[in-house]
Amino acid sequence: MTIEDRLLALIREALVTAAPRLGIEGNLPEPELMAPRQREHGDFATNVALALASRAGRPPRDVAQAIADALPDATFLVKTEVAGPGFLNFFTTDEWLHEALREVLTRGTAYGRSEPNGLHAQVEFVSANPTGPLHVGHARNAALGDAIARLLEFTGWAVEREYYFNDAGRQVEQFGRSVEARYLQVVGRPAEMPEEGYFGDYVVDVARDIAAEFGEALANLEPDERYRRLLSEGSRRILDGIRATLERFGAHFDRFFSERSLLESGEIQQAVERLRDAGYTYESEGAIWFRATAFGDDKDRVIVRSNGAHTYFGADCAYLVDKFGRGFDRLVYVLGADHHGDVARLKGAAQALGHDPGAVDILLYQFVSFLRGGEPIRMSKRAGVFVTLDEMIDEVGADAARFTLLMYSNDSSMNFDIETVKRQTMDNPVYYVQYGHARIASILRKARDRGVALRALEEADLELLASESEVDLLRALAEVPAQIATSAEQRAPHRLTHAAQDLAARFHRFYTECRVVSDDDSLTQARLWLCSGTKQVIANTLGLLGVSAPESMERTDA
């Protein structure tokens, strides 16, 4: 049981005792704990008295004092103070911090991990059209989606990662026509590029690769068959490249799902019929419309055009049916801010189709402004002017890119300056955190080289870790499980990047103020175990962000 669990149990017991004295009847609120901003205000605080004051008809400070007076004795609780407008501040002993370190060292990579909850989540992210290589504009989506999937898995969910690709729309058609034209040109046949085609050099590379495999054979097919084959061959090569790029970026997918498969299987038509049978469609101007306004959207939406072709949203409805049909309890979509209009209609479609709209989580993220040395990078996939994600990985590295992209809340816009991010200096946050891990690894190696071996944890006197910097570091370790749980619940991996930086900062301070290996053998053992625990938690935290924890690094700003 964590210190938070113990404190909450204590507060609940006090509430039961104090309620009759305060004239409060009925259900009592569930208390919540928070960390005071200033250390002198205690280790934990609760505002439960503020929530009860109106029911008691008394000032919040009086209610807080009544709760404090009713608190049972506890060996881990030093004192309780009423503060501000009615907060209760709790001061605890350091014993629980030593217990937290023991838990870190006992559980290792599982520290902070939750037991399986029996629920299944699907995280769908990136999902860029297979019309070209992934570029830096896709990077934030990939980092966010993968980190959220890692967090959900760590907190008990069974997770499937899915990439949904549009292989049935106009953009893909234009890509296919572009590949066809370039292929014909490569094999010496006359061909004009489509006006709205894709003019990047990568299309020429795809055409040359196809020509290397098939020669002129595809050029001799009937036009319709030739186009279909070249679209298929071109899309396959682009998707293979996308898969390889994502793996390099540390984003693994369990399934790539084709929009065309929804059409060919009849699932789009079935979804339309389900919406019609539920009374949520109507016909107008030859098209079939979904009554999206019934669910808070600003207007109704076409799901089947007058020419019989489905819209993107029509496919989205079928995709919802398909996802829920696979038994997922939670559907997580990671979408750019330009998809804000999809939120109401997707949740509405889920409800209209007979599913819980609360099971549909849509995470919208603001776009990133990519810079090089302070100058904006201009990009256009059609014109072929962009920085590919592979190029960014080559230059910056996946670790630095991911950590930087995850440093900000998804609803905050951000700048990503390639020249700044790739600097291996202590003012670069990812380098700062990774260097903390590498420094600890070096400390432990040097201790072993000097013949100072770690003895059994049971023999270590962790109570010797009592200096201010040691206690601060212990506190950071103890807070990580709650930070992981909150990051997962709120779909907010940026909270972990902040936790990692804070943990590294506290370690660097500890290292500056405390000599790890000294003539005091007992203190040396305690501090070596503290270093080992810190190294483990930094590695765990970085792992949840998809960032490596190196065993050695060079300082380039020393």
Image (cartoon, rainbow, N blue to C red):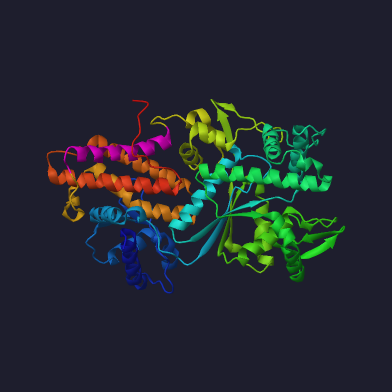
How many marks the image carries: the answer is 0
Q: Position of residue 154 (x, y in %)?
A: 43, 56
Q: Position of residue 136 (x, y in %)?
A: 58, 37
Visible residue check, residue 125: yes
User: Who's the residue at 68% across and 51% down the image?
Assistant: 341
Instruction: Give the residues in magenta.
Output: 428-452
Q: Nearer the viewer, residue 481 or 315?
A: 315
Q: Tell whether position 436 is magenta.
A: yes
User: Who's the residue at 18% across and 56% down the image?
Assistant: 458
Magenta: main secondary structure: helix
Which image quadrant for residue 354?
bottom right
Q: Nearer the viewer, residue 427 or 232?
A: 232
Extreme right residue here? 285
Q: Nearer the viewer, residue 399 or 275?
A: 399
Quadrant housing the C terminus: top left
User: Who's the residue at 43% across and 66% down the image?
Assistant: 29
Q: Tell whether position 8 is magenta.
A: no
Q: Is residue 233 left or right of residue 255?
A: right
Visible residue check, residue 172: no
Which image quadrant for residue 453?
top left
Q: Position of residue 253 (x, y in %)?
A: 55, 52
Q: Is residue 54 above or below residue 215?
A: below
Q: Nearer the viewer, residue 283 or 225?
A: 225
Quadrant housing the N terminus: bottom left
Q: Position of residue 122 (x, y in %)?
A: 56, 58
